[in-house]
Amino acid sequence: MRTFIITFCLIGSGLIFLQVPGVQDSLMLLFMAGIIPGTTDRISSSAMLFGWSIIGFALIARIIFHFVTIERLARHYMKTKKRLPRRRYSRA
């Protein structure tokens, strides 16, 4: 319940923050063109490519880890199910 409340408050705060005028434009310019909001500085294209590559690699690794974990748990469940004795009065 605690985690739900904290997550709900964080999402609500983020939505309120996004309602401030100019925030969406600044974030879009930061993510797409590398222009740092409030300054005249820019992030180089190679640094942006490196950053997006790291983010993409982390996302793909997380997805693969998720599927490998699910497959491992399924194999463990099936192995455990095979070892259990059959019930005498099963409904099958």
Image (spheres, rainbow, N blue to C red):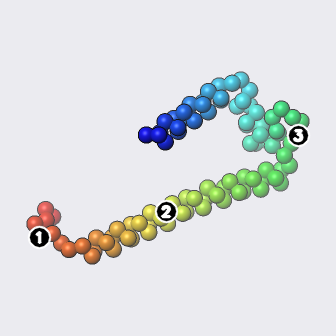
Determine whether the residue tagged by mark 1 lies in a helix, strand or loop: loop
Determine whether the residue tagged by mark 3 lies in a helix, strand or loop: loop
Rendered position, 47 above or below 12: below
Seen at 66% across and 55% down, the residue is 56
| Observer-nearest of 44 and 4 | 4
How crowded pointer 3 is (Cα within 10 Å; few <14, some 14-19, many 20+) is rated as few
Residue 6, horizontal then vertical, whole percent = 52, 37
Horizontal placement of 54 versus 1: left or right? right
Q: Quadrant of the C terminus?
A: bottom left
Seen at 60% across and 61% down, the residue is 61
Q: Mark 3 sits on what residue?
A: 41
Q: Earlier in the sequence, mark 2 or mark 1?
A: 2
Query: Which marked residue is nearer to the observer: mark 3 or mark 1?
Result: 1
| Observer-nearest of 80 and 74 | 80
Q: Are marks 2 and 1 in contact (CB under 8 Å)?
A: no
Rendered position, 18 above or below 80: above
Q: Amino acid at mark 3?
A: Asp
Q: Gap between marks 3 and 1, in whole Å?
A: 75 Å
Q: Are marks 3 and 2 in contact (CB under 8 Å)?
A: no
Residue 13 is tagged as none
Residue 63, horizontal then vertical, whole percent = 55, 58
Q: Amino acid at mark 1?
A: Arg
**Quarter residue 87 falls in:** bottom left
Q: Quadrant of the N terminus?
A: top left
Q: Earlier in the sequence, mark 3 or mark 1?
A: 3
Seen at 73% across and 37% down, the residue is 28
Total numbered badges shown on the rendered structure: 3
**Residue situated furthest left in the rendering:** 89
Residue 67 is tagged as 2
Q: Mark 1 sits on what residue?
A: 88
Residue 52, horizontal then vertical, whole percent = 72, 52
